[in-house]
Image: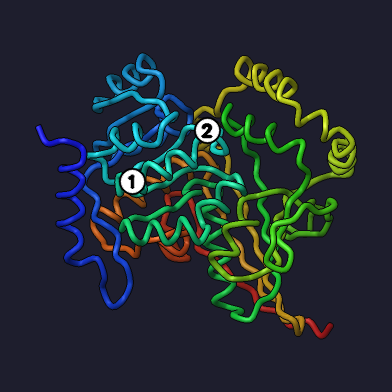
Amino acid sequence: MIGYSESLGRRFESYRAHHFLFGKPIAMPIRSWMIYGANGYSAQLIAERARERGLTPILAGRNPDKTRAIAERLGFDWRAFSLDDPQVIAESLNDIDAVIHCAGPFSATSAPMIDACLRARTHYFDITGEIPVFEHAHSEQIDAAAKEAGIVICPGVGFDVVPTDCLAKALIEALPDASHLDLGFHGSMSVSPGTAKTIVENLGYGTFARRNGVVVNIPLEIREVDYGKGPRQSMSVSWGDVSTAFYTTGIENITVYWPANDAMIRQFRFLRLLHPLLRLRSVQNFIKSQIEKKVEGPSPQKRDQQHVHVWGEARNATGKTVSARIITANGYTVTQLAPVAIVEHLLQHQVIAGSMTPALLMGKDFASRLDGSSEITETELRNSG
């Protein structure tokens, strides 16, 4: 049996011969891949999509009984390991070329998995929407390490943030000197337990945006947004594009919005008074325990009935403004389709190594290529102000 170090060495040495192509670091090819956190709602959707496409991921997770039950139902191999020690994780990845990481909260699990993927030279993808996770994954240190290892580090390959990231790339191509970027989305979407827990974790920290290149906490901002059916009052939210759109576009001022009526805006402003309480671990744990008991992800029928309208607007210093829109399938359907589409792409194509966003990796039309999504439409305006 080939040991961990020997197996890894053979994988890497066979790749080094074409480590660089036209001066750019090329990522190692994919043959085997894993879905980690397999008993989660979104992970099971991704695994089911993989089976539909004739792919054979290995399912993994911390709980052997739950992981085995799902793997046996789908006909996949499985393994169980915790995320306590990056070296142990790396040894569990010695024969794995790519991981779709689905085990939240990503604020706790992403860094050790990324560390292990760098050690094992295994591509890293996840479905997070958490700004600190994006900032870590796109740091200069992680980017340089990923290039040296010949791997892709690409968080946020679900609805957080694929459609908005593709709009951001389309807008910067339409207006290369844009200095400000606003993004937003509107749609009826039920939430899974994992998403609900992430929302709870963020309740005590207010609203984040990017200003002059830096992620900062801001007072709640309100503006009118036309998602496709006329203007709607919307408020700023801490969506992942506050981080990722900066790396996709270089635009230094980014705000994300969703629709909000007056009552919702009052509630969010009131919550600012409770931030110290909402950050307490005991309060967080209590709310999360209630989520475990009461929250379930949407059924296939509900997902099929729900679509999301995504909007973006870029403007430059002279007041020129460009907007764009796309309609996508339900957010969980996007999260199901996008990771599998990325794996299929990497099975057939070479890509550049390093820290990537979905739109940089797959192009601005990636969201439009997913089932249930429209083409991106752009409107160019000139503002005399």
Q: Position of residue 11 (x, y in %)?
A: 18, 50
Mark 1 or mark 2: name the one nearer the start of the chain: 2
Closer-to-camera residue (281/341): 281
Q: Residue at x 62, y 67 (%)?
A: 324
Where 237 falls versus 40 (above or below)? below
Residue to which mark 1 is pinned? 119
SS at circle 2:
loop
Q: Position of residue 199 (x, y in %)?
A: 67, 35
Which residue type does callout 1 highlight? Arg
| Residue 94 placement: quadrant | top left
Closer-to-camera residue (320/104): 104
On screen, residue 346 versus residue 172, left or right, reads: left
Q: Residues within 10 Å of mark 1 (few under 14, many from 20)?
A: many
Closer-to-camera residue (115/296): 115
The outermost residue toward the left is 1
Q: Residue at x 47, y 65 (%)?
A: 364
Colour scheme used in the picture? Answer: rainbow
On screen, residue 163 versus residue 284, left or right, reads: left
Residue to which mark 2 is pinned? 104
Q: Position of residue 306 (x, y in %)?
A: 58, 40
Q: Position of residue 337 (x, y in %)?
A: 41, 45
Which residue type does callout 2 highlight? Gly
Q: Residues within 10 Å of mark 2 (few under 14, many from 20)?
A: some
Closer-to-camera residue (231/249): 249
Label 1 to label 2: alpha-carbon separation: 21 Å
SS at circle 1:
helix
